Every structure is written in C-alpha cells, then in structure tokens.
Image (spheres, rainbow, N blue to C red):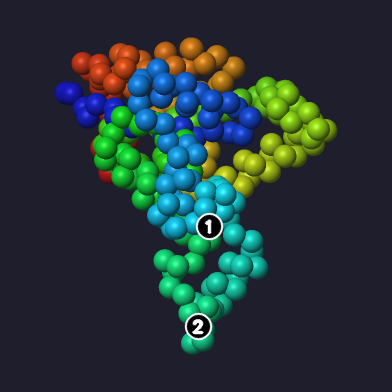
Amino acid sequence: MLRTPVKVITVEREYGSRGGEFAHDLAARLGWRLLDAELVAGAARSAGVSPELAAQFDERLDPWYYRYGKVFWHDSPLPMTGLGDDQVFDSERMFSLIRKEMEEAAKEGNCVLVGRGAACALACQPGSFHLFVYATAKAKREWFQSAFPKQAQHADQLLAAFDKRRAAVIRKFYQQDWCARGLYHMLLNSAMGMEAMMEAVMGAAGLCGGDKPAERSMGLAGEAC
C-alpha cells in the first residue's frame, strides 16, 4: 500500500557532527527550503525583537533563578510586570514561536528543518522523515579544534555542554530524551561522508532526486499517531 510521500525532513544533530552542514547540503540537493537560522529569524519577527536577541534564547533554557521566579510570580496574586505572556520574550516564548514556525513550514512541505525539537514537534505530521546525525568523540574533537583553535584545550567539555543544553530543552518542552532512537527514522554517523549520507537518506525516504517522491514511499511514524 502506498504511504504519504515525504515532504519534510528534520535533522537533529550532535554538536560537532556536521549535521547542520549535512542539512544544508541535503536541502540544496533536493531543491527544498532550508530552515535553520531562518527559524530564529522567523521567531524574532513574530515577537517583534531583533534576531540577535532571539539568538540568545536559541536551543537553551532560561537560568534556573528566572524559571523559579516566573513560577513564583505566576502563582502569586501580585502581577510580575503587568505584561501578558505574549509580551514577555524568554526561552519559553522562543520555543513556542519556533514550534509554530516549524508547523507552518511542514504544512507547506518541501523543507528541511534543523534541530530545535523538530522531530518531536512533527512526530505526528504525515510525510515527515526524522534524522539524527552523530559522530565519534574523536571526529567531533577534531572538528572543534579546527573551528575554534583558541579553545581547543576545552574541546571535550564544550562539546558535551552544547549537547547537554540541547537535551535539556527537549526534555523540558517535549518530555523526551533528545537522542532516543525511537524519535527518528534513521541514525547517521557522519563518518560515512556527506554524499553517502545523502544517498542513504534519499533512498530510505523514497526520494529519487529533487522533490519527486519515489513510487514506493516508506511508512512514517507520524501516520501511527
């Protein structure tokens, strides 16, 4: 039986795995729209704030003391600032706006979404195909040392910190383990190379090049929801 053709690909990635680079190349190969930094820019426009401010809240939680204070003031009869939730820009607001951007993009289709819990947000979206890109510690360390030579001695700590922060965001807003295999249709080790990764994804997703679906598209997790 034919299934819904793939029109949306999400790419979650370990920091240093070059997953973001892969997503850019994949979108270019397919001729699809890429949504990476564009998600942040879209959230900034919706909130009426600068992209620079929005970037400070990208894939990160608010400090613990802010979250504690927010809970306290929400439960208090005294108003915190006199502003509504839609007028306060913080990580929770950023998350909400980015999720809306992703859902709207998925409705239009023919797009590649990078990180930010896209696999969770679109878990029940027909026609979505979810990827997780990882790499060995050695490969990530070498990438980091090449990209940030002045911080090379702290490579392992900073690589771990980035992934820990991403995982914390997914855990808070989606109650999911960021690297849980069940969230994704395919796990890719970037050591196989960009070209091999693209061929593997396009074959598994039933895409025969460009945005034309193959005659036999695979079943998707979202269709079981």
- Residue 156 place in picture, x, y as percent: 75, 34
Disc number for residue 180: none
What residue is rendered at 31% in x and 29% in y? Answer: 110
- Residue 146 place in picture, x, y as percent: 73, 24
Q: Name the foreground residue: 56 vs 121.
A: 56
Residue at far bottom of view: 77
Q: Are marks 1 and 2 in contact (CB under 8 Å)?
A: no
What residue is rendered at 53% in x and 57% in y? Answer: 91
Q: Is residue 204 above or below residue 36?
A: above
Provide the secondary structure element on which disc 2 rests. loop
In this image, 223 relative to 69: left or right?
Answer: left
Of the 4 image quadrants, the one containing the C terminus is top left
Residue 92 shows up from this direction: no
| Residue type highlighted by circle 1 | Ser
Q: Is residue 84 above or below residue 50?
A: below
Provide the secondary structure element on which disc 1 rests. helix
What residue is rendered at 44% in x and 17% in y? Answer: 198
- Which mark sits nearer the N-terminus, 1 or 2? 2
- Residue 57 place in picture, x, y as percent: 56, 53
Q: Which residue is mark 1?
A: 91
In this image, 186 relative to 166: left or right?
Answer: left
